[in-house]
Image (cartoon, helix red, strand yellow):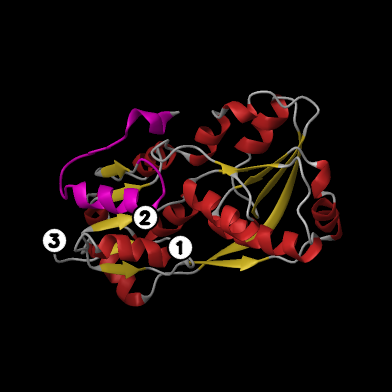
Amino acid sequence: MSDAPVLIARPGARAQALVEALEQRACRVRSLDIMQLEPCTPTPAERTLLYDLDQFAVVICTSPFAADCLSEAIEARWPQLPTGVRFLATGASTAEVLGERLGVDVAAPSRGSGSASEALLAMPELEELTHQRVLIAAGEGGRELLERTLGERGGRVARLALYRRTLHPPRDEDRRCLAAGAYRALLVTSAEQLEHLQQWCSDASRARPLVVSSARLATLAHTYRFSCVSIAGDATPASLAATVAGAQGGTPASHHDKRASDT
């Protein structure tokens, strides 16, 4: 099915960079457009967190869209950034957005480190946080791993919900494509995307290549009976596109994890 499309579930502006990376590898791409990202208006308590930015030792950003929203919120309240705040990001793309928008150095796990939250928690900067205030800038909902683990390490953790995700059913044509398994590969980068899409997948589609961005997503995929799962080293467009190019259709559980993905 080399002429069949690669179906991608990544939302927002980041989808375009992924489309371009796939097209560079001669893939035909179709965006499923099932998820929308919408900025949230900060609550009074969240506005206080933003005005108290100088009281935090560490600020962690969990996605490029969160980085954009955080940068906009900070720029509206801080004509000059406070000193002494360490900025961290869950991935290279998020770090790039935050660094470009705010002009700060941003630490992030190295490319190919695997699952974003686990890789971030393995960084030496977060080993010991006793009595330090930590701000997590993220979307509504999502995993609680960062908050729980950083709290266990002594951090005083606050969460700033900057955007919400809304899910939509696939278009009729995309539903038919999913049900028939009429695609080269399906590419998902979050549990929400996979949980949403699996309801339109058949035995035929579960036997087609599924490319995911972490070992955690691969484990979830196997619970939904996907049998040809490939894991990218990280969620960057280049890594995802390379994994799609290497995925083999119709073969059982290829599970390409680079051992770092299991950390």
Q: Nearer the viewer, residue 170 or 142?
A: 142
In the picture, the disc for residue 252 is: none
Image vertical order of residue 55 relative to residue 245, above or below: above
Element class at badge 2:
helix
Which residue in the protein does label 2 denote? 237
- Residue drawn 58% across and 53% down? 99
Instruction: From the image, state whether disc 3 or disc 1 is nearer to you.
Output: 1
Distance (Cα) linking label 2 and label 3: 20 Å
In the image, what residue type sits under mark 3?
Answer: Ser
Q: Position of residue 136 (x, y in %)?
A: 68, 45
Of the two numbered discs 3 and 1 on the same chain, state the one appearing first in sequence: 3
Q: Earlier in the sequence, mark 2 or mark 3?
A: 3
Q: Could you classify mark 3 by the number of other residues whose Cα lies within 10 Å: few (under 14), some (14-19), or many (20 or more)?
A: few
Q: Is residue 208 above or below residue 5?
A: above
Q: Secondary structure at mark 1?
A: helix
Task: Tell me the quarter of the image containing the N terminus.
Answer: bottom left
Q: Amino acid at mark 2?
A: Pro
Q: Which residues are magenta?
A: 233-262
- Residue 14: numbered disc: 1
Q: Nearer the viewer, residue 100 or 161?
A: 100
Reply above or below: 12 against 103. below
How far apart marks 1 and 2 lie (CA) works out to 9 Å
Q: Are marks 1 and 2 in contact (CB under 8 Å)?
A: yes
Q: Quadrant of residue 170?
A: bottom left
Please, what is the three-letter code of the amino acid marked with disc 1? Arg
